[in-house]
Amino acid sequence: MNTEFDYWLEKLRHGRWMLHLGGIDARRPDWIAAQFQWHDCADVVIIRAEDSAVAFRTPTDETTDVLNPDTVKWVYGDDKSAVWVLRAALSLPSPGSPHEPYHLIDAPPACRIPPGGRRPVTMRPR
């Protein structure tokens, strides 16, 4: 990945997003996911490659698997660059704000990392 990607990924970390790294080697993960938990929803970014990433906001409760959601309120990406997806996620208005996008839909396949595809996983807390 490039330095612009590194810049936006670092903004996630400084924004207190939790990182999930999947694959055999945490230094070279197969995928990277980042999660920011709000009161009743979560913002999530999943990066599979430099040109394959998705960001979404999903409603949450105590049973929600944010890496395998049923529904999303907002989604951006899949065929977008990781840099653009990170920018979109970091500029998303807070939940409940007048400018928050909200259109509840079934989660597209790109918003999912099935539980079987997560082993091993490394989590880096906020």
Image: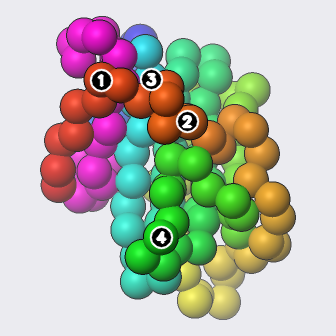
Residue 106 location (% of width, % of height) = 81, 59
Dot 2 surroundings within 10 Å: few (below 14), some, or many (20 or more)?
some
In this view, the residue in front, 90 or 34, is 34
Q: Which residue is mark 2?
A: 113
> Image check: 105 left or right of 26?
right
**Which of the two marks, 3 or 1, is nearer to us in this view?**
1
Q: Which residue is mark 4?
A: 63
Q: Are marks 2 and 4 in contact (CB under 8 Å)?
A: no
Which residue is found at the position 77% from the left and 45% from the top? 108
Q: Are marks 3 and 2 in contact (CB under 8 Å)?
A: yes
Mark nearer the N terminus (2 vs 4)? 4
In this view, the residue in front, 90 or 44, is 44
In this view, the residue in front, 125 or 116, is 116
- Give the image quarter of residue 19: top left
**Which of the two marks, 4 or 3, is nearer to us in this view?**
4
* Label 3, label 2: how far apart the Cα atoms are: 9 Å
